[in-house]
Image (spheres, coloured by chain):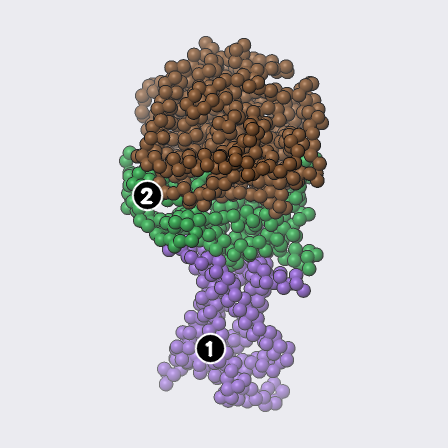
Amino acid sequence: MAGHMNITLKVWRQKNANTKGKLVSYDAKDVSPDMSFLEMIDEVNEVLIKKGEEAIAFDHDCREGICGMCSMVIDGRPHGPKEGITTCQLHMRSFKDGDTITIEPWRAKGFPVVKDLVVDRSAFDRIIQAGGYISVNTGVTIDANAIAISKQDSDKAFDAATCIGCGACVAACKNASAMLFLSAKVSQLSLLPQGHPERKSRVENMLQQMEDEGFGNCSNTGACSVECPKEISQEHIARLNREFIAAKASSENV
Amino acid sequence: MNWFISAVSSSVGKKIMMALTGLFLCSFLVVHLIGNLQLLNLDLGLSFNTYANFMSHNPVIQTISKGNFIIIIAHALIALFLTRQNAAARPIGYQVNKGSKNSTWSSRNMGLLGTILLVFIAVHLYHFWWAVHYGGSIPSREYLTDHGDLSSYTDLYQAVWFAFSNPYIVAFYVFSMIAMGYHLYHGFASAFQSLGLNHVKYNFFIRAVGFLFYFVIPALYAYIPLKIYFLTCSSSCSH
Amino acid sequence: MKLDSKIPEGPIGEKWTKHKFKLKLVNPANRRKYDIIVVGTGLAGSSAAASLGEMGYNVKAFCFQDSPRRAHSIAAQGGINSAKNYRNDGDSVYRLFYDTVKGGDYRAREANVHRLAEVSVNIIDQCVAQGVPFAREYGGLLDNRSFGGAQVARTFYARGQTGQQLLLGAYSALERQVNEGTVKQYTRHEMLDVVTVDGVARGIVTRDLVTGEIESHSAHAVLLCTGGYGNVFYLSTNAQGCNVTAAWRAHKKGALFGNPCFTQIHPTCIPVSGDHQSKLTLMSESLRNDGRVWVPAKVGDKRLASEIPESERDYFLERKYPSFGNLVPRDVASRNAKEMCDLGKGVGASGLAVYLDFADSIKRLGEDAVRAKYGNLFDMYAQITGENPYKTPMRIYPAVHYTMGGLWVDYNLSTTVKGLYALGEANFSDHGANRLGASALMQGLADGYFVIPSTLSDYLAEIGPKAIDATHPAFAEAVKAVKDRTNKFLAINGTKTANEYHKELGKIMWEYCGMARNEAGLKKAQKMIQELRADFWKNLKVTGEAGELNTTLERAGRVADFLELGELMVVDALNRNESCGGHFREEYQTDENEAQRDDDNYAYVAAWEYKGDNQPEELHKEALVFENVKLTQRSYK
């Protein structure tokens, strides 16, 4: 097929959490512009395995932009040069023959590197465990239509709920803050009446957990929203701030 | 009180403190600018020196002024603390980083801009505030008031005009005001975001008032030394 | 072995209620003495683990992903069916039951499907209470849309991300239980075997994917919620990690495998662009509402779509099915697209695609209206193909999407191994030979939230809370077997990667056991798979070590199991001398080329028993008895 490219990759290789890593150069030859970025790395890995070398470890699963597993900083940007997509949705036609592409893992104290481009994002699970839910047991008997929720609030809650938990917000933030992730969940549940009974303790506990995990502080640069594959807005961080002020001012946790 | 300490020391609490101290300092900028513009009244310093005298002797103003110092220091200290925490949140940085694609330069360089402003404030205080209060090097000037009395004020007006005849000092002031513009380009709107005030109806006003703070006010501040410089330069050149 | 489906007595509408009353219960104070293992954290797994945790059991939840939230349930777009009848359009539990049995081409168990329809109502209540942001109308109440195979609007949805929102609901319930201490979560752990003691499931063996450590975990019961096996075809809409390993290991330990050949092939996917392709992306079925499917009328016509005049186009679905047109069911649409490509009328560089053309809709409704309806799908298409679907027709081709087959379970969701349960897509399920749209989410959540909490308690009450002896030699033996197998992969040191074998297997499966099958092809495929498998064990190359994160090794283990499952699918397809739903045997079609069932001889579930490596599996039949639904021939003319 016409238009095949040769690309040089500089990939972060790191054996495990306890060793130092470095950028290693690889040639990706005969790359089709129709390939996805991850398929390009698949091909590089096939060559490596055949040479008896270890494949580049990277996280990926659904390859359609929804599971949130893929996580690469490509040429200095989480999920690569295009906005509103994940790494797996990036295609090689966004690059040109002869390009050198640097690939690094998410960088944050809260996301320690496991191997190569794979990082440990269990901190996000622990933030959710701290309160990112509505405490209802299975077997609810309230009819789903018993509470009317304005379409506007419901749509806004949905906008927040689209977060796929990939961590690009942390990777993009100069402070490695997880505020956009946190705010997406707090915002979703505070916009819905079902979330109201726990809204004070939720925001207090989830924020505390984010700090305990070693993520930085939000300084409103807005980089997170730009790099977020679901384009979650800064508005949700503002809502989190409001929720937090209201909770601290009125909750009975002294 | 535990809850209060934990609220203020939390991640959101600290940025709220940054926002509140920052907005207070913005209000100070307005008051200070109104005074400074008196420098351009070519009345041998009557209006400016009256203003300066009022500011340095009124007990209420003096209290606010002390508070102002504390707030500047608090703003800087919290910022320092946040910066250190934020740096620790990413122990290993990126080899390639294209922050310019997702955020403004000023939002990523608030620490640098703030440091420039802190240096500026120190120099500025040394130039004028220190000289007035402790330096004793500034002579007084007497004015005939409307009531026919003679009033004697420290002639800060003359001291400022003298300082701003020096092109290096003028350049430093203008540079610092540009830094302030960039600092407020991010800082002003950011303060409202930190306070949770992000709403489709009011964002326009925040942006509009923000323009005043990041452009109009710094420009006027910078205009004063430039204007004085060119006035003194043209008068000395005409000799 | 005699298969006992344990279908309760009584009228269909009362079976589940009566059965629940008869099931034994476990006293709340005793529940914490029971350990339960849940493998997989998709809709079925997360909902089961959370519900059982809430009840007070000690639950261990395992997933191979880095977080439970990433399970592939998340990718479901369209929606979830529920017999709420909020639209007052004549829906009922019975109608949902009826539509599902009919849609499955009469190869599902009536009692299970009716129970599914009953609890579908509770699912929506549960999810709304959890904060799942379903689409709403301006009045603030829930919105519905209609879906294929039904004449009522009973599908609840959350934009194009219903699966994600439902999974996040179940995930948050799960994380709440982790916080409460009733569930312990094991992420990046892959289950590699079931431990059985005297034929009863007592635990599992896992590999910690980060450290490579092989561990055993004991429990009173093991729940497999590990999804489907569509990735046996290499290219499918499944996630990269989806695999059959857990189910296949269970099968080899005695769990029968039901209807393995029943595969759903979705008609509207973005076609393969080259050999590098790793996965196929689904375009929502809703596109067929406004797009017209066509191919050039002349064989081998390679002109651009825009250069082919209207008179030289063949709108084959509209031509063959004038009343349903482009909206025929998935299996019919898929088969016809294949037929056109087989005739040499396929479009695009590969010739394996048909056009889905929106030109008429754009002319009729305007580009803006089309954008408002399908904008995100068009963008996705443009992103993947680099073509503008507003200007040139989309190219689509069918792709493997879902597997109706799976581990055989009785009415209680128990496999034929005592103490081993299968939920969601992992079981042979309630969908018969063809699943209707928006029913997969419903089944996963029904099993996890509402069925297993009742039926599992009955088993636990029966065996009692006595601690499981984790020092039993069976655990050490199972661990050793897994370690040996892992080391074997590394020791072969051949020349071909697991990925290459997987690709080859996929090609065989797609060619001979895909949309259309015939005896000669299936026999050929069986032989090819056997040869490929033998070569795999001689010539595989795996790099890296056992004691570390090693994605190459993980892949090898999964492909090894697919190579065994693939043969069983072919055997099952060969055995079923009829066409039904997604299983189309070319020898068995009506004069109008439609699937022809043989209800006299094949109205049964084919459940296969493993008999040893490279030994033919033994067929067991569970006869399907239809007391409520009348068996008819589907027609869409």
Q: Residue C616: x and y, percent? A: 44, 19
Nearer-the-camera pick, A187 or C505: C505
From the image, state the color of chain A.
green
Chain ID of residue with mark 2:
A
Determine which residue is flagged by label 2: A53
Residue type at mark 2 is Glu
Q: Residue C492: x and y, percent? A: 34, 35
Say what secondary structure mark 2 lies in.
loop
Determine which residue is flagged by label 1: B123
Residue C535 horizontal side relative to residue A134, left or right: left
Residue C503 horizontal side relative to residue C115, left or right: left
Nearer-the-camera pick, A218 or C245: C245
Q: Quadrant of residue C169?
A: top right
- Residue at 37% of width from left, 83% of height from top? B238
Q: Quadrant of residue A89?
A: top left
Q: Nearer the viewer, mark 2 or mark 1?
A: 2
Residue C170 horizontal side relative to residue A148, left or right: left
Chain ID of residue with mark 1:
B
* Residue C360 appears in the figure: no
Q: Residue C602: x and y, percent? A: 52, 13
Q: In the displayed structure, would residue B123 be above or below residue C487?
A: below
Say what secondary structure mark 1 lies in.
helix
Nearer-the-camera pick, C339 or A129: A129
Disc 2 crowd, CA 10 A, few/some/many (<14, 14-19, 20+): some
- Residue at 66% of width from left, 48% of height from top? A198
The chain painted brown is: C
Q: CA distance from mark 2 to mark 1?
A: 61 Å
From the image, state the color of chain B.
purple
Image marks 2 and 1: residues in contact by CB distance under 8 Å: no
Q: In the displayed structure, would residue A127 be above or below residue B9?
A: above
Residue type at mark 1 is Val
